Amino acid sequence: MDYDISLAGNFGEPRPNHFHGGLDISTDNVEGKVIYSIGDGYVSRITQGIDGFGNAVYVTHPEGYTSVYCHLKSFSPRIQAALRDYQYAHETNIPDARLSPLVCPVSQGQFIALSGNTGHSTGPHLHLEIHDTETWDMLDPYEFLNDYINDSVPPQAHGLMAAPMLGEGVFNNSTKKQTFGIAGHQLTQAFTAWGKVGFALWGDDYMQGNYHHYGIRETILMLDGNMIFRSNVDRIPVGKNTFVNAWGDYDHWRQTRRWYLKSYIEPGNQLSILHADSLRGIVNFNEERDYHLEYILRDFKGNESHYAFTVQGVRQEIPQTEIPIGQRFLWNQTNSFSYPGEMQLVVPYGLLADDMILQPVVVRQPDQLSDRYSFYPVSYPLMAEGELMIRARLENIGSDRILSTEADPSKIYIRSSLGRYMGGDYQDGWVVGHINELCYAYALDYDDEPPAISIITNTETASDVLRLNVSDAQSGVATYKGTIDGKFVVFNPQEKTSHVVCNLRESPIRKTGKQHQLLFTATDHRNNTQTIETSIIY
């Protein structure tokens, strides 16, 4: 940018199911600010509506990095032309152009886009990511923009959590998690413990000149002068994004919207940014003495703050904790659960950070394609997708719901209790799909109804823009294609609507003021197809 950088969000902030993968750079709450490439390279990818980025430009640099500019209002004319050329050359409506180095080279400081508010954005800003081009690990853009960002304010802790290990520890005479507010740098509360206890911290980083709060770059926990835990949020593999739910206390966040980040590592947590001693950061209070603990918080600029507290080891019996009724899933193996002949859930190794108790519930629906199955009473996201198989009762497909003369098993799919299409393939009486959340209820549904297509533009008046509405209430629109006079034309999805738009000025159709024939076909995820044909004036 050509003005001072102010951040609305920083790299590595914990979010549900993912880390914030870049910097949110303020654009003074307006759209249309000029965006320049941070270095020499070439435009390697241009996308619209993918990964929540809205309009996005990827620039690959010879040093081995790729910078990504997201939520853009529009691209530079050169980049917009490269996107259209790619779409017409490949006859694709998906705005995801992968370009070779010679198509669109850029220099440091070259204009590439205007800032906007597209995609999963709650206000105008630029989201900037930097990735290792080879591994696609997310890197902290601070490393590249350090000289342009002012920050002399240290991180601040707000709350401490003590988490006794199940059946192995007690803290302040309780086996339950407890939280304590932090008002100063020396916690004066009287703490007692016995056995194994982990700690977690809720805190934020700050910068002068604004009221935003940010994630903390480095957290260290010291015990009697020795480091037992350290987190350094500098490089995150994209494939490990969901492990943020294991580092943070996800259940506490779900209830309070506050992230307490654990200063211990659960056995299945695969985040390389976490480091701990042989006890994984857990403190074993096994001596009757004072244990001196201290948190050290640092930001990228080296500003740091310290928070000290003392816990007295007091020998006592550790009560056995009541364990919920259900099937235990172990973090270090592949787990499965089934209702024989009806349903089977498989959670492969690597999808759990720690052991858990599955608590399945089945709601019988004898007149439906299947019963409804859920596996946990509250939100419990897996680290990746597990496999769900549900037996289909084909005899329950009512004749009033099918357009063909007999049932087609390929039209069956898995639907969640949120009404979300979850896909699935029919195989020998079973529908096999994938899920990553255990609390939703899942059942089979049937879709033999094609998408709905309606024309919004007045086709009797010459217009440079042709707009259609394309929707599907069940499995959702999968693909669509439009031609005019037999020639492919690009229809791009319109931001945050079910509309698709064709800019005829960028198409191969010449404006004559005469009639042209539009043919448009849409197909949903169960391969139901709808086609319309009409005349337009252009």
Image (cartoon, grey):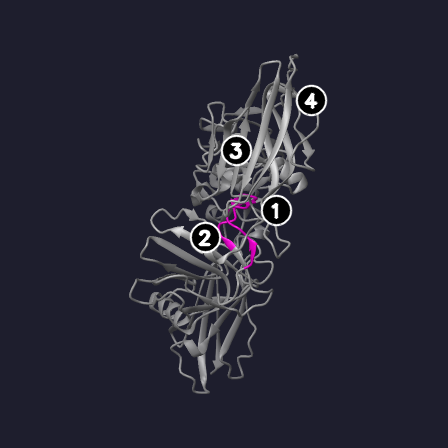
- Sequence-wise, which precedes: disc 2 or disc 3? 2
Q: Who's the residue at 49% across and 23% down the image?
A: 279
Which of the two marks, 2 or 3, is nearer to us in this view? 2
Question: Residue under circle 1?
Answer: 418
Between 156 and 279, which is closer to the camera in this rendering?
156
Q: CA distance from mark 3 to mark 4?
A: 44 Å
Question: Residue under circle 4?
Answer: 172
Give the residue type that dot 4 points to. Answer: Asn
- Sequence-wise, which precedes: disc 1 or disc 4? 4
Give the residue type that dot 2 points to. Answer: Pro
Range of the magenta residues? 6-23
Above/below status of 14 relative to 177: below
Res. 141 mark:
2
Give the residue type that dot 3 points to. Answer: Met
Question: Residue under circle 3?
Answer: 343
The quarter of the displayed image where residue 208 is located? bottom right
Q: Is residue 388 visible?
A: no
Q: Who's the residue at 44% across and 43% down the image?
A: 236
- Sequence-wise, which precedes: disc 3 or disc 4? 4
Which of the two marks, 1 or 4, is nearer to us in this view? 4
Q: Residues within 10 Å of mark 2 (few under 14, many from 20)?
A: some
Q: Who's the residue at 47% across and 45% down the image?
A: 409
In the image, residue 16 lies in the stretch drawn in magenta:
yes
